[in-house]
Image (cartoon, coloured by chain):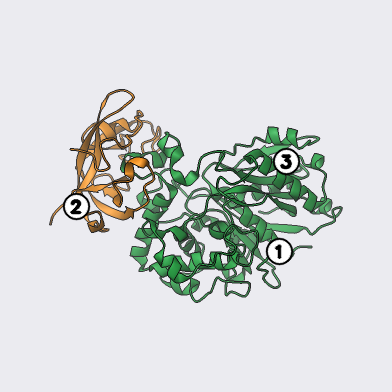
Amino acid sequence: MHGQAVVVGVGESEYYKHGRSPDTEFQLACTAIKNAAEDAGLELRQLDGLISYMDDRNSPLRIAAALGFDELSWSATPWAGGGNNSSATLQFADAAVCGGYANYVVGFRSLAQGQFYRLGAGTGVASGGGPPGLGWGLPYGLMTPAQECALHTKRWMHDHGVSQEALANISLACYANAQLNPRAVRYGQALTREDYHASRWIVEPFHLFDCCQENDGAAALIVTTPERAKDLPGKAVPILATAQGLGPEIGANAFQERWFPGMYYGNVGRMIWERAGVKPEDIDVLQLYENFTGPVVMALCEMGYCEPEEVEAFTGDGALEGPNARLPFNTSGGNLAEAYIHGLEMVVEAVRQSRGDSTCQVDDVNLSLAVGGPGYAPGSAVLFGPAS
Amino acid sequence: MTRYLGDEFLTPTLTEQNTPFFTSGRIQIQFCDDCDHAQQPPDDVCYSCQGTNLAFRATPGTGSVESAVLVHHPIHPALQERVPYVVVVVSVDGAPGCNVTGNVVGCPPESVEIGARVRAVFEEAKDPATGQDLLIPQWELVQD
């Protein structure tokens, strides 16, 4: 169920607050891909595959031309949603190189929300865009992913007796880990539990610090076969397993009774554990996409880390903070505190952990897992083994 | 009745599939005439039997609050004076498995609790594109 593909290069642009990038979104994409090629020891012309996600505005045709690819032989995007597809880019890359359709495939994501619109501002929905299910909420002022995820989270907390502290634990872990990461947009901005509770409500139960940032920046990863990787100078990180998918009817309506409340991550968890032959407790370090903290605690439970009634204790007492945490988690600061590059920056961090390059490096990493955004389907995950 | 979020607030973009819900003055849900499966939002195919004999049926217009959140951040300029407002998910009586979204009107927003019984009321508006009359479903608490 898994190929033998490896990640041989990662690259990023600088990460900015939204609207602060001096570069266009296309320039950011090209920068991240150039940096990834340099990291891999590849010439740009050797790259021959491109994968992004969620209606990427940076066409593979334009990138291949601008970066001087000799040939583009594979391009794809997983179906839309949002950061749910971050890890799926690696599955497509794995499939492409293991199937022999391309040699060096790039997964990338670039966002310049100053140049374009802010996802969280509801702009797309107000102009008639956005997911069809969300359009039904428009006359009711239900226009943003935060509001949609809040409706799930509120009911889930109600059903399982989960307090606000569980959500706070996620936010505090991301901010604590970002203080070790100079690339993080929130570096130097430590967050206390008091700050968290004092921050304004966006939509209950989400305070400001329960919500991801919106940022400008780009990230890229390059995937190839182990045979080709032998000729490259750097470390190769094996893709042990990937998952992408959804259960029956999940895609139809965010609020239908069958899946309400929930984040639809049971399927993704089952696929990744079965394909890799491992259990949640075997994972050495976890990057779990946070659009908002609520979906994170729900996804932890759905993927089998703990029961909902246990999630406050499971995440509490610093259990997710720092390299020596009980469960090292979102070690770069994640979407909340490093940067929101639609979660692809978290896949880059998962590779860094396997290579031993993180600013919050966990000892002896054998299994490094990156999970795409809970809250939207189809979800995705990718599991990396130790670098060689 | 005047609109909960103001008469100037955004109206739904009418489509063939949402017109019954937003114009009829009833809680209209799509059912499959072959297998009686109910689905929301409507689609071109029945998700239970894959048939295409689909039609809208009026439900009794009552339901239960499945979730309720207070929105504090005004996402649209017209909402500056309206926050905090309450957004709910309501399970529709007579349409198994179907949840719809809305506001609960006529009460303090913080008083809406999960499990509350509600009944439909309708806001009058006009579709700015066509001038068509809209009756936008909303909900009010049913007093015990």
Q: Is residue A320 above or below residue A114?
A: below
Determine the residue positioned at 62% across, 48% down: A217
Mark 1 residue type? Ser
Mark 3 = which residue? A49
Q: Chain of mark 2?
A: B
Q: Is residue B116 above or below residue B133?
A: below
Q: Is residue A375 above or below residue A180?
A: above
Q: Position of residue B93 (x, y in %)?
A: 23, 47
Give the chain coloured green: A
Q: In the shown orientation, is residue A286 left or right of residue A351?
A: left
User: What distance separates the C-alpha of mark 1 from that of mark 2?
Assistant: 54 Å
Q: Is residue A280 above or below residue A270?
A: below
The quadrant in which the C terminus of chain B is found is bottom left
Question: Mark 1 or mark 3: which comes first in sequence?
Answer: 3
User: What distance separates the C-alpha of mark 2 from that of mark 3?
Assistant: 56 Å
Is any part of residue A5 visible from this angle? no
Q: Position of residue A271 (x, y in %)?
A: 57, 57
Q: Residue furthest left?
A: B144
Mark 1 = which residue? A354
Q: Secondary structure at mark 1?
A: helix
Q: Chain of mark 3?
A: A
* Colour of chain B in the rendered structure image: orange
Q: In the shown orientation, is residue B123 left or right of residue A285?
A: left
Mark 3 residue type? Gly
Q: Position of residue A32 (x, y in %)?
A: 70, 47
The quadrant in which the N terminus of chain B is found is top left
Mark 2 = which residue? B107
